[in-house]
């Protein structure tokens, strides 16, 4: 590792951002899992906007790819529609 002041700072920043991104990604995965396992119609409708918003924010910050966020949101919408119809 280089001993330049700027490179040392970059290492510190990278560590911090990696931790934040990991936490955000893990939180997203847990929220998605909870959403997928939920069968209650009211709960699904309540969770959908929250998880959808979370996906958009993570895509905006480049934690996940924007197409991945879109695909996950489409699958979630499919479930909301299926639960609403039943």
Image: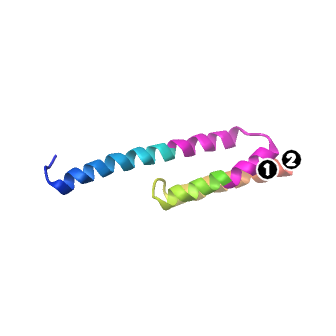
Q: In which quarter of the image is residue 4?
A: bottom left
Tell me where residue 72 appears, x and y as whole percent.
61, 52
Q: Residue at x 62, y 44 (%)?
A: 32
Residue 7 visible? The answer is yes
The answer to if 55 sits in the magenta stretch is no
Label drawn at residue 49? none
Tell me where residue 24 appears, x and y as whole percent.
50, 47
Q: Quadrant of residue 52?
A: bottom right
| For residue 81, side relative to residue 27 (left or right) | right
In this view, the residue farthest toward the left is: 3
User: To which residue does mark 1 refer?
Assistant: 82
Q: Dot 1: few (<14), some (14–19), or many (≥20) neighbours within 10 Å?
A: few
Q: How far apart are marks 1 and 2 (CA)?
A: 6 Å
In the foreground, 37 or 45: 45
Q: Residue at x 51, y 41 (%)?
A: 26
Circles 1 and 2: CB atoms closer than 8 Å? yes
The answer to if 45 sits in the magenta stretch is yes
Compared with 11, 65 (above or below) is: below
User: To which residue does mark 2 refer?
Assistant: 86
Question: Residues in magenta?
Answer: 26-49
Q: Which residue is drawn at 57% across and 54% down?
A: 55
In the foreground, 19 or 73: 19
| For residue 37, side relative to residue 57 (left or right) | right
């Amino acid at each position: 590792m280089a001993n330049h002041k700027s490179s040392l700072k970059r290492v510190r920043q990278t560590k911090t951002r990696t931790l934040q991104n990991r936490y955000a990604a893990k939180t997203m995965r847990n929220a998605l899992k909870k959403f997928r396992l939920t069968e209650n119609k009211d709960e699904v409708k309540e969770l959908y906007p929250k998880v959808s918003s979370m996906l958009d924010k993570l895509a905006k910050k480049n934690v996940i790819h924007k197409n991945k966020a879109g695909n996950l949101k489409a699958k979630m919408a499919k479930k909301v529609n299926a639960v609403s119809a039943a």
